[in-house]
Amino acid sequence: MKRSLVLLGSTGSIGKSTLDVCRNLGPERISVHGLAAGTNWERLAQQAREHGAKQVAIADASKRDRLVEALGGTGIEVLAGPDAAARLVAHEACDTVLAAVTGAAGLPAVLEAARRGRRLCLSNKESLVLTGPILGQLARAHGAELIPVDSEHSAIFQALRAGSCAEAKKLLLTASGGPFREWSAERMATASREEALKHPTWDMGPFITIDSATLMNKALEVIEARWLFDLPPEKIEVVVHPQSIIHSLVEFVDGSVMAQLGVPDMRVPIQYALTFPARLPLETAPFDLARIGRLTFEEVDRARFPSVDLAFEVLRRGGVAGAVFNAANEVARAAFLDGAIAFGAIVRTTGRVLERHAAAGPGRGVATPDLEQVLEADRWAREEARRCLSS
C-alpha cells in the first residue's frame, strides 16, 4: 500500500531520519504530501523541493514570506501560524502522519490526525504524556492507528506481536544511562552543557539528549507506555542497558521474555511504523553479536536520577499531572541549555513545580480532564517553573 505522508517536525533529527527512510522506500511506496517545521524555513524549503511536497507549514508566521519566496515557482502551498500543522494533517490527501515535533507544540496537530483517522506514527512523547486518555479515546472513536516510533516503545510494540497486552506480565524499558551513568551526584550537579550533550550511543537533537542525561526521557516514556499499551504503572519497569542493543522487552505471564534487538539506528523504528505490518529492506550497520560480545544491565540509581520516581508519582496523581511534569521540565531544560541554571536544577525544579501544583495548581483532583484543562495546567506549570527559576 502506498502511503501519503505528512511529517511534523521535518527539520529536526527524527524528521531528517524519516526523510532518509522515504528515500529508501521510494516514491512507489510513500509520497511526501506535506512537511511542517517551527522556524527553520530554509531547510523546510530545501526538503519540500527535494521530496516534491504539495504543502508546507511553518509555525512561525513571521517566516512565511521568506518561505514563499524560497518556494517560488514550485506550486507548493505555504501554511503559516500556530494552527498550520493541524490544517496540514486535515488535508484529504494525507493518510499517514509522523509526529516528530518536540514538546507540547505538536499536540493540536496530533489530536487532529486522530480525529481524521490517520495512521499516527508517534515520536512526540508529549502527546501521550499530556493527553493519553484523550488521544486514546479519539483514536478508538475514529479508527486511527497509533504506532510508536520511539525505539523503546517500538520494541515493545514489536515484542507484543508474540502475545497480547492482557498476557503481558511486565514491560521493561531499557535506558542507555546517558553520559552521566557513572558520574557521582555531586559531579552531575555541575555538569556543563557540552558534557550533557555527549550521548554515548544515540545521535539526537539537543532537547532529547538533555532529557537522556537527566533520564527525563525515560520518565516520559514510562508515562507514555502506560497510555500507549493500557497497562497499569506497576507493570512497567526501567532497566539501564548501556550498549543500547536491546531496545526494550516484554515479559509474558508464562515466563517467556521477548526482546527486540538491533544496532542503534532510528530509521529502523521509523520505517517499521510507516510500513507496518510489512518489513521492508533497509541498509543498516551489520548486527554482529560476537563483536558486540557482552550485553549488560543495571538498576536505575534513583538517588542520582530521581526523574524516574517522579514519573510514577505523576501516574499515581493522574489528571493533569503529566502536563505539569512535562511543562516544568521543558522550561528548566531550556534554562540549562541557555546557561541560566546548573544541570542539577532541571529535575529539582520539575519536582518542585509538581509539589506546588498538588497544593494549589489548576485542575488538581480532576480525574478525567478535558483538553482545555490540560492546556491550562501546561500554561500554569510554565509560569510556575519560571518563578521557581527566578527565585
Image (cartoon, rainbow, N blue to C red):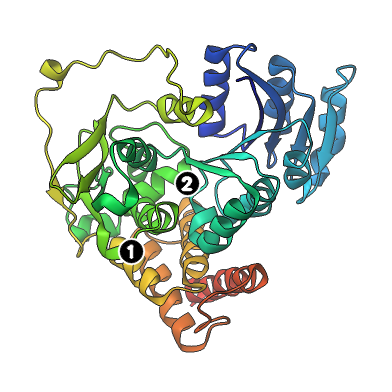
Question: Above or below — where is 165 with respect to 278?
Answer: below
Task: Residue 292 in the image: state x and y as whole percent.
Answer: 15, 22
Q: Is residue 362 above or below residue 117?
A: below
Residue at disc 1, secondary structure? loop
Look at 37% across and 26% down and name the residue there.
265
Choose the circle earlier in sequence order: 2 or 1.
2
What residue sits 57% from the left and 53% below the top? 140
Q: Amino acid at mark 1?
A: Pro
**Which residue extends farthest bottom?**
359
Q: Position of residue 226 (x, y in %)?
A: 38, 58
Which amino acid lies under the numbered mark 2 shown in the image of this protein? Answer: Phe
> Which residue does the image show at 33% across and 50% down from the upper left?
165
Q: In the picture provided, is 292 more to the left or to the right than 106? A: left
Q: Which mark is residue 232?
A: 1
Can residue 193 be seen by looking at this rendering? no
Tell me: 37 left or right of 251: right
Q: Is residue 387 left or right of residue 164?
A: right
Q: Quadrant of the N terminus?
A: top right
The residue where tag 2 is placed is 207
Q: Is residue 140 above or below residue 23?
A: below
Whether residue 310 is visible here, answered yes or no, is yes
Q: Position of residue 47 (x, y in %)?
A: 68, 22
Q: Nearer the viewer, residue 237 or 391?
A: 237
Left or right position of 310 against 113: left
- Of badges 2 and 1, nearer the viewer stands 1
